[in-house]
Amino acid sequence: MSSRLEQLQEMIKNEPNDSFLNYALALEYAKKNELKKAIEIIEAVINADKNYLGAYYQLGQFYEQINDFKKAITTYNKGIEIAKLQKNNKTLSELNQALFLMEE
């Protein structure tokens, strides 16, 4: 049986621009502690689809894990802007909390 990572890689061959599939692929790389690859993929998701809101929180988390706090803050703030535009209060709250915890 193939791994989830392999399954996602296969699915992406047919849908290379699918934001959700690429986001899921990034999470799988992160589970394997391949944060550099995970970050590259999520950055690409955001570059292709600036409104893919969930990616901002996750990318900020990845930046925090590699101690790139400046990029994490920038990412959270950009996500906050988009969450406000989308009127997505749940994600807005999560991004604000992540930013607040960084400032402690």
Image (spheres, helix red, strand yellow):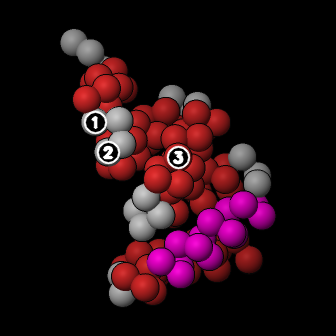
Residue sitting nearer the eye, 12 or 74: 12
Image: 70 above or below 11: below
Q: Residue at x 58, y 33 (%)?
A: 37
Disc 2 vs disc 1: Cβ atoms closer than 8 Å?
A: yes
- Is any atom of residue 37 visible in this view? yes
Q: Which mark is residue 15?
A: 1
Asked whether, in this view, residue 39 is left or right of residue 13, the answer is right
Residue sitting at x 46%, y 40%: 26
Please state the horizontal and vertical placement of residue 35, each as a whole percent of the image: 60, 38
| Residue at numbered disc 3 | 44
Crowding around mark 3 (Cα neighbors within 10 Å: few <14, some 14 to 19, many 20+) is: some
Which residue is the site of mark 2? 18
Tell me the quadrant of the picture where the C terminus can be found. bottom right
Looking at the image, which residue is at 25% across and 29% down?
14
- The kind of residue tagged 2 is Asp
Q: Secondary structure at mark 1?
A: loop
Nearer the N terminus, badge 3 or badge 1? 1
Q: Which residue is at the front of the view, 93 or 37?
A: 37
Q: Are marks 2 and 3 in contact (CB under 8 Å)?
A: no
Give the residue type that dot 3 points to: Ala
What crowding class fits label 1: few (fewer than 14 Cα within 10 Å), some (14-19), or many (20 or more)? few
Does residue 11 appear anywhere in the picture?
A: no
Q: Which residues are magenta?
A: 69-82
| Label 2 – label 1 distance at C-alpha | 6 Å
Task: Tell me residue 36's x, y (percent).
Answer: 64, 36
Q: Amino acid at mark 1?
A: Glu
From the viewer's perspective, is 35 left or right of 16? right
